[in-house]
Image (cartoon, helix red, strand yellow):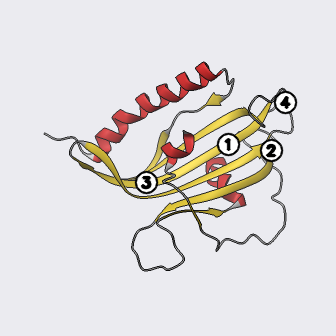
Amino acid sequence: MAKGFNSLLRAYLPTFDALVRHFLKDSGLQTVFSGVSIFGQTDETSYDLMASFEGLPQRPGSRRGHSENVFITARLSGNVKAGQLRLTHYGTEIGYFRQTKASEPLCDLLPITGYHYDFDCDGKKFNHPVFHAQPKLKAGERYISLKANITHRVYPDFDEIRTIRIPTPQMDIFSDIV
């Protein structure tokens, strides 16, 4: 019997997580990668996923310490074709937060920026590239709402332009992590 999207996705996650952790170790990055986990399921082909990086350096090679946290949530849908996972839709949100207290790396975080990535190929929207990003400062909010131990400062008050769609390569949760 052929494996479905559900079983292939669940089988893929531990392998993907191990590869990311191996890369981080080989790169010398002392960040905490949560791994990708499923936190919701609409049906047999649509899942809600989440992942995080805690304690990333502000820049590659930075000696100022590891003070950035990245929180990612995603909904993805797909199927299996020729034994391979195929995405048919995704929506990924990635939020960036600066740590304000080294002793409490998940408390009083400063929101920096965030983005929403989409895969929409209905072909009916002129200003809607198939793969695109949109600015979204509150992109980490969904992740944070699932974790009682994370607190952040109030988001800056400004008019965010959410209608700008920047063409991108495919940026599902796995592409974002890589």
Callout 1: few (<14), some (14-19), or many (20+) C-alpha neighbours within 10 Å? many
Mark 2, residue position: 109
Q: Callout 4, which amino acid?
A: Ala
- Proximity of marks 1 and 4: CB atoms separated by less than 8 Å: no
Quarter of the picture containing the N terminus is: top left
Between marks 2 and 4, how big is the CA–CA gap? 11 Å
At x 80% / y 44%, what residue is drawn? 109
Mark 1, residue position: 70
Q: Which mark is residue 76?
A: 3
Sequence-earlier tag: 4 or 3: 3
Mark 4, residue position: 102
Between marks 1 and 4, how big is the CA–CA gap? 16 Å
- Proximity of marks 1 and 3: CB atoms separated by less than 8 Å: no
Q: Nearer the viewer, mark 3 or mark 2?
A: 3
Q: Callout 1, which amino acid?
A: Val
Sequence-earlier tag: 1 or 3: 1
Between marks 3 and 2, how big is the CA–CA gap? 28 Å
Mark 2 secondary-structure assignment: loop
In depth, the one of 147 and 84 nearer the eye is 84
Sequence-earlier tag: 2 or 1: 1
Residue 131 % position (x, y) = 49, 62
Residue 75 % position (x, y) = 47, 54
Q: Callout 2, which amino acid?
A: Leu
Farthest residue in the left direction? 1
Sequence-earlier tag: 1 or 4: 1
At x 65% / y 28%, what residue is drawn? 32
At x 77% / y 36%, what residue is drawn? 59
Q: Tell me the quarter of the picture where residue 16 sits.
A: top left
Tell me, yes or no, if residue 44 can be seen here: no
Callout 4: few (<14), some (14-19), or many (20+) C-alpha neighbours within 10 Å? few
